[in-house]
Amino acid sequence: MSSVFKRAADKKRRDRPYYIAYTDESGRRRTIKGCTDRAATDEIARQLEQDVQLRKRGVIDRVKERCAEQGHRLFLDHIREYTAHLQAEGGHVERYLQQVSARLKAFGAFAEIETLVELDADRVVAFVRSLRKRELADATVNEYVGTLKAFTKWAVRTSRLPSDPLSVVRKQSAKTTERKRPRRSLTADEIGVMLQAAVERPLHELETIRHGPRRGQRVARVGGAARARALAKGRERVVAYLLALWTGLRRSELHALEWRDVQLDTLPARLTLRRLTTKAKRADTVALHPQIAEALRATRRADSTRTDRVLGVVPGMKVLKADLAYAGVWFQ
């Protein structure tokens, strides 16, 4: 049975609402706010009791009811909850989570949708067309489609959507996709000039005037401490590149390397990768080429501890491209 009441402090005030206390289909006692009108609140209470009975008898499908409620919530709220779900799963770096959120928000802004129920295949197809008009690479467009499809599958699994609206949407076949930036390996000569560029460029940038009539001239005065920091930055960058070249480790794996992972006294020297730091979540051992082993010995400070990072900074794509451009190496 339900009961309709006003709170003690509101009993003599007509502008205060009534409340309804009732027992739901699972036996839990609940209280919700009604109206300021007693008759209207009584009607709501009767409807709640009827709905409880219908749910108990299976006449009202609770999954469909939840889908209806969730479908009218803000699309942005679902995006936040989806990225939180991915984060809780583990195995995803922060950059990936940011990309997922950005892709979903870009679609929502293009399609001008506010609630989840507005998401449909036609809007996604139109969004994909717009991406192709921007001349994005086929692989990038496929990543957008994959993110949207993964999102709607999650929405179905969590009873936010009754069915997957994107089940008919397909990625472009890998056989027909065209690489916008074909990959190629660097030659040995190109690697050599790139490493030399990595050493020289930080100091070169400090010595180059950036503004004014002498812009671009390498005549700026650089103090001894700043010069030493620039040279140290270049040497550390070279070590990062050598590690990447000789081991094939990902950027996140390089960033996670600590001195306890490096054995320089063995023959050959090796890295012992911790399970939690690898993308595959698998502990592994990687033998080190003598060149990188020697570079690591020269880099390690006498006061470094086992848990200090091997690399203070791991160069990103922007820095890599700048080093390649400085070295005069073609890169796409």
Image (cartoon, helix red, strand yellow):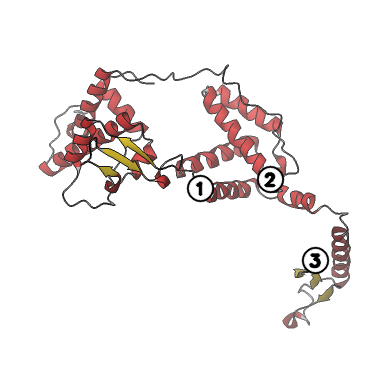
Q: Where is residue 314 in the image (x, y as percent from the top left)?
A: 32, 39
Assess disc 2: are there few (<14), some (14-19) or many (≥20) residues with their C-alpha within 10 Å of its C-alpha.
few
Distance between the Cα atoms at labels 2 and 1? 18 Å
Residue positioned 24% across, 30% down in the render: 198
Say which residue label 1 marks: 90
Disc 1 vs disc 3: which is toward the camera? 1
| Residue type, label 3 | Asp
Q: What element carries label 2?
A: helix
Q: What element carries label 3?
A: loop
29 over 186 or under it: above or below: below
Distance between the Cα atoms at labels 2 and 3? 24 Å
Residue positioned 84% across, 64% down in the render: 48
Query: What is the total number of numbered labels drawn onto the structure image?
Result: 3
Q: In this view, does 288 lie to the left or right of 147?
A: left
Q: Is residue 16 left or right of residue 246?
A: right
Q: Residue 157 carries which label?
A: 2
Q: In this view, does 56 lie to the left or right of 63?
A: right
